[in-house]
Amino acid sequence: MQRIIYLARHGETSWNREGRWQGHTDIALNEAGLAQARALGEFLRARTIGRGIARIYASDLARARQTAEAAAAILGVTEIVVDAALRERSFGIFEGLTRGECAQRHPDHWRGYRSDPSLVPPGAESQDALAARMQQAVARAVVRRNADDDAPVLIVSHGGSIRTLIARATGTMPPPLENGAVFSATVVAGALRDVACLT
């Protein structure tokens, strides 16, 4: 079985603009983010003429849910499935801080993380744990409900989560993603293939 998926990062929040680590902290979209969410819907509507989007899956954090809802309204998709496994990586004591504040308030943990990203700060999630839950979420999203259920699905998640998922599939970590960035991929027997950045 194979299925096309679109992986999209949520729109902008005030913390994105300020350069703050969000992680599991629940921050809503700002006005620019809402516009990016609508632009995502327009982009995919133009790209998927004749095939449509079967369903949208979204992280349970507000910034991803709002992005999914705005895109769904344009795409005419009525079903949004919320899955907490699509959340951003938890960054523990770094959440809510800018990189400068991390260096100032937690210098040892910041130096360790900068030298080796596997040295996560207290309370943070490992990349292995993040990759595992993202892979499980994608596997759930591509399950067919009936014989005719083969249209692409849209997954709205977060920058770090999407990058980690793609790195596991391709062996190469993508650069940081812009808000509203979109990738396409084909899921074959649970594995991502033909990953391409569309924006």
Image (spheres, rainbow, N blue to C red):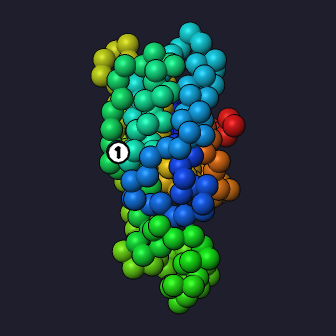
Give x and y (percent) for residue 182: 61, 38
Towards the viewer: 102 or 117: 102
- Identified at 43% across, 29% down, the residue is 69
Q: Residue furthest top?
A: 50
- Identified at 38% across, 13% down, the residue is 148
Task: For the N terminus, give its image quadrant.
Answer: top left
Towards the viewer: 87 or 34: 34
Name the quadrant containing residue 79: top left
Report if residue 64 is visible in the image: yes
Give x and y (percent) for residue 110: 55, 82
Towards the viewer: 43 or 150: 43
- Identified at 32% across, 48% down, the residue is 84
- Horizontal side of 122 relative to 52 (left or right) equals left
Q: Residue furthest front?
A: 31
Give x and y (percent) for residue 115: 62, 82
Disc 1 is placed on an element classified as loop
Report if residue 192 is visible in the image: no
Towards the viewer: 11 or 198: 11
Name the quadrant containing residue 122: bottom left
- Horizontal side of 152 relative to 43 (left or right) equals left
Q: Residue furthest bottom?
A: 108
Reply above or below: 181 against 2: below
- Identified at 56% across, 9% down, the residue is 50
Amino acid type of disc 1? Asp
| Residue at image mark 1 | 60
Tell me the crowding category of disc 1: few under 14, some 14 to 19, or many 20 or more residues within 10 angstroms, Cα based.
many
Task: For the C terminus, give its image quadrant.
Answer: top right
Give x and y (percent) for residue 67: 48, 36
